[in-house]
Image: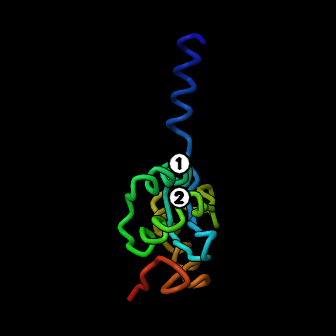
């Protein structure tokens, strides 16, 4: 690959807008959910297995379930993304947070149903 082509590809990668939105981490053993959001869902998806492997999660219930079932019982799934072309860039974070709130309200991932903490 020539140097100019390589520079073009690097520039295109830097300018690409990552998928943003809401994800769930589902425990396939007991059905508990963790609902979260990210401004870069691909990065969150890629880092999730490593966070599980090294117990880099502060949720004690999730840690206990991880110790019982192991990382293989947890599945990362994208629930919904925003369309960055229809929303002003400055509003992307609030749009993602609004989606997360919507999904938490719908799925109620609290107590025995999930790992999230109810918001006050």
- Locate residue 14, reporting x and y percent: 50, 36
Quadrant location of the C terminus in the rendered image: bottom left
Write down the residue under mark 2.
Answer: 71
Left or right: 3 in relation to 83: left
* Label number found at residue 67: none
Disc nearer the start of the sequence (2/1): 1
> Which residue is depicted at the point 55% across and 55% down?
41
- What element does badge 1 sit on? helix
Tag 1: Cα neighbours inside 10 Å, few (<14), some, or many (≥20)? few
> Vertically, is 119 above or below 3?
below
- Looking at the image, which residue is at 37% across and 58% down? 56
Looking at the image, residue 50 sits to the left or right of residue 1; the answer is: left
Q: What residue sits 50% from the left and 65% below the top?
A: 37
Q: Which residue is at the front of the view, 37 or 34?
A: 34
Q: CA distance from mark 2 to mark 1?
A: 14 Å
Q: Which residue is mark 1?
A: 46
Q: Can you tell which of label 2 and label 1 is closer to the viewer?
A: 2
Is residue 99 placed above or below 13 in the rendered structure?
below
Q: How many marks?
A: 2
Q: Quadrant of the N terminus?
A: top right
């Amino acid at each position: 690959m020539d140097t100019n082509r390589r520079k073009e590809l690097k520039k295109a990668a830097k300018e690409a807008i990552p998928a943003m939105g809401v994800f769930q981490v589902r425990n396939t053993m007991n059905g508990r959910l963790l609902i979260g959001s990210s401004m870069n869902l691909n990065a969150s998806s890629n880092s999730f297995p490593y966070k599980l492997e090294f117990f880099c999660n502060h949720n004690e219930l999730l840690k206990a379930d991880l110790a019982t079932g192991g990382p293989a019982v947890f599945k990362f799934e994208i629930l919904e993304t925003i369309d960055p072309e229809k929303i002003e860039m400055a509003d992307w974070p609030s749009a993602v947070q609004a989606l997360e709130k919507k999904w938490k309200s719908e799925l109620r991932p609290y107590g025995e149903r999930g790992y999230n903490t109810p918001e006050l």
